[in-house]
Amino acid sequence: MERVFNFSAGPAVIAQSVLEKAQSELVCYRDKGMSVMEMSHRTPMFEEILAETVALFRELMGVPEGYDVLFLQGGATQQFSAVPLNLMATGKADYVDSGNFAHLAAEEARRYGTVNIVASSKEDNYTHVPDVEKIAWNADADYAHITTNNTIYGTRYVKLPSTGDVPLVADMSSNILSEPYDVSRFGVIYAGAQKNIGPAGLCVVVLRSDLLGKASPLCPKLLNWAQQQKNDSMLNTPNTFGIYMAKLGFEWLRDRGGVAAIYKQNVAKAALLYDFLDESRLFRATAQMEYRSLMNVTFVTGDKALDDEFVRFAAAHGLVNLKGHRNVGGMRASIYNAMPVEGVQKLVDVMKAFEAGRP
Amino acid sequence: MERVFNFSAGPAVIAQSVLEKAQSELVCYRDKGMSVMEMSHRTPMFEEILAETVALFRELMGVPEGYDVLFLQGGATQQFSAVPLNLMATGKADYVDSGNFAHLAAEEARRYGTVNIVASSKEDNYTHVPDVEKIAWNADADYAHITTNNTIYGTRYVKLPSTGDVPLVADMSSNILSEPYDVSRFGVIYAGAQKNIGPAGLCVVVLRSDLLGKASPLCPKLLNWAQQQKNDSMLNTPNTFGIYMAKLGFEWLRDRGGVAAIYKQNVAKAALLYDFLDESRLFRATAQMEYRSLMNVTFVTGDKALDDEFVRFAAAHGLVNLKGHRNVGGMRASIYNAMPVEGVQKLVDVMKAFEAGRP
């Protein structure tokens, strides 16, 4: 079976060489006589895998001293709860509503305190993110929350907000490791793994160490960052195979030059697609130009039936999962780190062919 | 590399044919042109895998009408929090303290209400489980919690308690699907996957439907059973690959005759080991005979240095992870469903050889 080009928003494409490496050692890992899936998490063979995964991530992301890195279960949605449970010491937080997941994060935080939506792009159908320079942040908030890339609407922050002494918390699920970030600007960064890291069932959490130890007594044990930090992400059995897959993905990224190099490629991949969309007479991009995501490219024909026809046409050419999210309609091409340039080029070619076939 | 016999308590041995099946379709699943890890959880190809996993589990476990089955993240420890957050409507629950995880479950529940330890075998070093017929359950408890098999101490309940109208909640992490259970005796059953189901990062939860809808408003969204039930375990992206591995494991179990057949084999495997231990002049089992686990066989020589020597001797013969938990010392052979009889026989042979080598 030939592999397709998979434009899914998540779980998403994984580099073929990463899958092949995992395949080669799935039954027996190196000289261990067992699969990674069968390893006790309390043995040196797994502890080494975990330590390497953390070290590679720190290197790729440029995580400075004074920050801890955890690999937890539950995906970003679990962190929607963990963030307020660990940080809402005085019971209030600022959230920016820039899309579906930003909204869900804020809704979950309301369970535990007062949430101030300091800016929203909802009335513009989330076709952009709010202008960070116009946001009036609350100086007494426990933290300020943003979503750096909006998977469903295909937008991203091109500038980070300055929130003064209030820790900036970011959900980076859909663009982590795709472009350089200065981690020291953030109090907390979290990201579900299933877009730019590896398989679903894992979440990376980067924590500025001074923010630990403020958890609510009602915070479930596994969601307590300080306890997880004290136990090196192993307060209970972690998602061991997911961590191993993340390690293989990080090695792949390192071998390709790391974040700086993949960022250049991501810019080029996105440009290939947006340039075509801007010239097309049939398709158009839906996100405002200034805020266009490098990871999720949303576009429409303007005709629902034609959109559906294109999705089928593309699938017949081995380009799958191009249907847009139901909130937006149209199409979405998720072109994460692991999507090769060839996949994007083929998508452009197929769009051209589709367009050429209509009067 | 030859595979070892892996006696790890969890993550634990997985049947080789299951691993080989996963290996064969790791890069391309059937005719889908992608790995299971790359499938969007919102596509028919994954929804089919999830539905088959649930159906197989229901069939193997004999889950009757009126019960829901969820596959969640976080392992059993997450359920230590979820149980009180979903069930402690009036703020009190009964727990039996039969070992380490039973104790941890009770400790976590204390965060959310009053926990009554209605029986404990702690003063006997957990070498047995409390006699269920002598327990005075509280008729006004929101639920009563037991741990059907105690992984660390190698004991199990041979009889289930009768708790009247109070729902019985059971952590079955280390013996689920290893022996027949009448699910209708329980209100809730939960089990981490990494012992008898598949890789770590997954937890199965069986819920009597009338117990849904009582969650605390402070229950994090992902821990809310009713919300997960309404969303078929996909309130957010589930551990898709873990679910797929569970499905392969369930197919393997079904093809071997299901729980009734594996139970017979488990009894025979355990007898092989216990019979030797009872005759040995060097080794002895630590759990009281009546309560001996079929899954985790704990034993000692009585001499710590000799224990360590045996663990090394066994490892040199390809029998690994036999070191007992630090709370108990000595040795522990975890002989879950996927441990072949040959592995247990080889362990007995190696113990005999070790014993023969001493005066």
Image (cartoon, coloured by chain):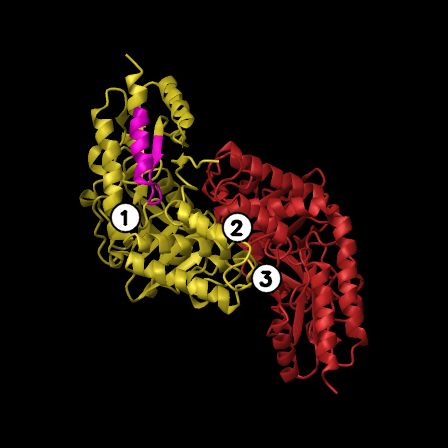
Chain colours: A yellow, B red
Evaluate whether residue A117 shows in this view.
Answer: yes
Q: Identify which residue, B172 or A38, lies in the foreground.
A: A38
Q: Position of residue A162 (x, y in %)?
A: 21, 52
Work out whether mark 3 precedes mark 2 in sequence or the reverse, and give the earlier one.
3
Q: Is residue B70 left or right of residue A214?
A: right
Q: Identify which residue, A31 or B119, lies in the foreground.
A: A31
Image: magenta residue range? A332-351
- Residue tagged 3: B2
Secondary structure under badge 3? Answer: loop
Identify whether B148 is placed above or below B358. above
**Mark 3 belongs to chain:** B
| Mark 2 residue type | Gln
Residue depicted at x 34% and y 36%:
A343
Identify the mark at residue B73; answer none if there is no mark: 2
Q: Is residue B97 left or right of residue A271?
A: right
Q: Let me know if residue A140 is in the magenta part.
A: no
Residue B101 quadrant: bottom right
- Residue tagged 1: A262
Residue depicted at x 23% and y 36%:
A271
| Mark 1 residue type | Ile
Label count reads: 3
**Mark 2 belongs to chain:** B
Of tags 1 and 3, which is closer to the observer? Answer: 3
| Inter-mark Cα distance, 3 to 2 | 32 Å
Residue depicted at x 38% and y 30%:
A324
